[in-house]
Image (spheres, rainbow, N blue to C red):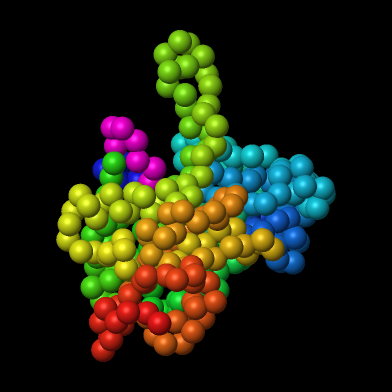
């Protein structure tokens, strides 16, 4: 949960000695569709007695039925409550001689949720095998920004009337102060409870929501207007909006926040990068994605605030 005080971690008992007969596979599915699973991952899925799919931290461009047809296995969807509060329901079937696969969009180790499951499985003597895949953390480099020039990754949560957190703001300021780029992961709301319906005694969930680059830019502009610390300039700081990375119809557009706020990036998922110092090789790559007539200014060492050509 974004920007809220962390809940006290439940103490973990000493780890039991793992046995290879008790296996939890945590398998990255990549960024596209059912075909993006690795051969090693597919082999593990086929060997598993039960297959769970975690789909609230990210989404694929295919549905569960297509995964089942490709894998030849029944796939059980594990929602947020199952993964975070009832993780035992995933770990328990792996005990004894069981083999369980937990499928994760992207790479398994890019979210703390999956790390928690790995730790809990190990404490119960379950052997954990992590099978990696492509993630947004690497795919973002396709825009031309060099990955080793990125600082802390931040999450941008949806603002609402009662809650408008800006904990991302000082991290962006810190990154840009050191000349580093910032990868912004945008909020996803899946299976969120409808509290009004619940007050009427009905269990109902709100439709899924996926933050767009446009909304992220609006909120980033609001955050700068609130803090006024110059972490970035909505009129001139170069940013890169990215949609559906790793898929055939991925879309990348570069420009200022004020320019990107009006660009149609299409279907989710979206993310964006806020540039720090831009190397000339990075700029050469980014130039292919620039909004026509962009008013951005470079913040690169030795060339501070030079108007972009």
Give the magenta-colored segment's residue range.
155-163
Vertical comparison of 71 with 287: above or below:
above
Characterize the magenta stretch by its predominant secondary structure: loop
Q: Nearer the viewer, residue 42 or 211?
A: 211
* Relative height, residue 121 to residue 140 (above, below): above
In percent of width and height, residue 44 lies at 71, 59
Q: Nearer the viewer, residue 57 or 284?
A: 284
Question: What is the quadrant of residue 200 in the picture?
Answer: top left
Task: Specify the quadrant of the image occupied by residue 20.
Answer: bottom right
In this rendered view, identify the residue nearer to me: 172 or 198. Answer: 172
Percent coordinates x, y for residue 157 in the rendering? 38, 46
Residue that lies at the very extreme toward the top in this rendered image: 200
Q: Name the residue at 26% across, 89% down.
A: 302
Location of residue 176 with respect to 108 vertically, above or below: below
Residue nearest the observer in this picture, 303 or 91: 303
Instruction: Report x, y in % for residue 162.
Output: 28, 32
User: Residue 221 vs residue 68: left or right?
Assistant: left
Left or right: 110, with 78 as reference point: left
Can residue 168 be seen in the rendering of this structure?
A: yes
Residue 18 visible within the image = no
Q: Where does the image place residue 291, in percent across and percent down from the top left?
A: 48, 68
Q: Residue at x 70, y 56 (%)?
A: 33
Q: Is residue 229 magenta?
A: no
Identify which residue is drawn at 51% across, 66% down.
Answer: 253
Residue 158 is one of the magenta-drawn residues: yes
Residue at 46% over, 36% down: 85
The quarter of the image holding the C terminus is bottom left
The N terminus sits in image quarter: top left
């Amino acid at each position: 949960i974004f920007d809220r005080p962390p809940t006290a971690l439940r103490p973990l008992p000493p780890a039991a000695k793992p046995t290879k007969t008790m296996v939890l596979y945590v398998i990255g599915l990549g960024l596209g569709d059912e075909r993006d699973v690795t051969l090693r991952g597919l082999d593990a899925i086929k060997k598993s007695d039960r297959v769970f799919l975690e789909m609230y931290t990210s989404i694929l461009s295919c549905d569960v039925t297509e995964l089942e047809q490709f894998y030849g296995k029944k796939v059980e969807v594990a929602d947020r409550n199952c993964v975070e509060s009832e993780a035992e329901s995933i770990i328990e079937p792996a005990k004894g001689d069981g083999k369980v696969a937990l499928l994760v969009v992207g790479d398994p180790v890019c979210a703390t949720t999956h790390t928690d499951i790995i730790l809990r499985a190990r404490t119960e003597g379950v052997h954990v095998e992590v099978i990696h895949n492509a993630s947004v953390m690497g795919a973002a480099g396709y825009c031309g920004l060099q990955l080793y020039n990125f600082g802390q990754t931040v999450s941008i949560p949806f603002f609402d009337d009662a809650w408008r957190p800006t904990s991302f703001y000082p991290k962006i300021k810190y990154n840009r102060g050191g000349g580093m780029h910032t990868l912004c992961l945008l909020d996803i709301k899946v299976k969120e409870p409808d509290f009004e319906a619940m007050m009427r005694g009905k269990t109902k969930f709100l439709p899924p929501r996926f933050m767009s680059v446009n909304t992220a830019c609006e909120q980033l502009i609001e955050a700068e207007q609130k803090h006024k610390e110059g972490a970035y300039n909505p009129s001139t700081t170069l940013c890169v909006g990215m949609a559906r990375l790793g898929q055939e119809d991925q879309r990348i557009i570069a420009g200022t926040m004020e320019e990107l706020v009006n660009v149609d990036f299409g279907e989710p998922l979206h993310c964006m990068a806020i540039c720090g110092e831009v190397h000339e090789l990075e700029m050469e790559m980014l130039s292919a994605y620039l909004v026509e007539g962009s008013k951005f200014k470079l913040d690169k060492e030795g060339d501070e605030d030079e108007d972009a050509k």
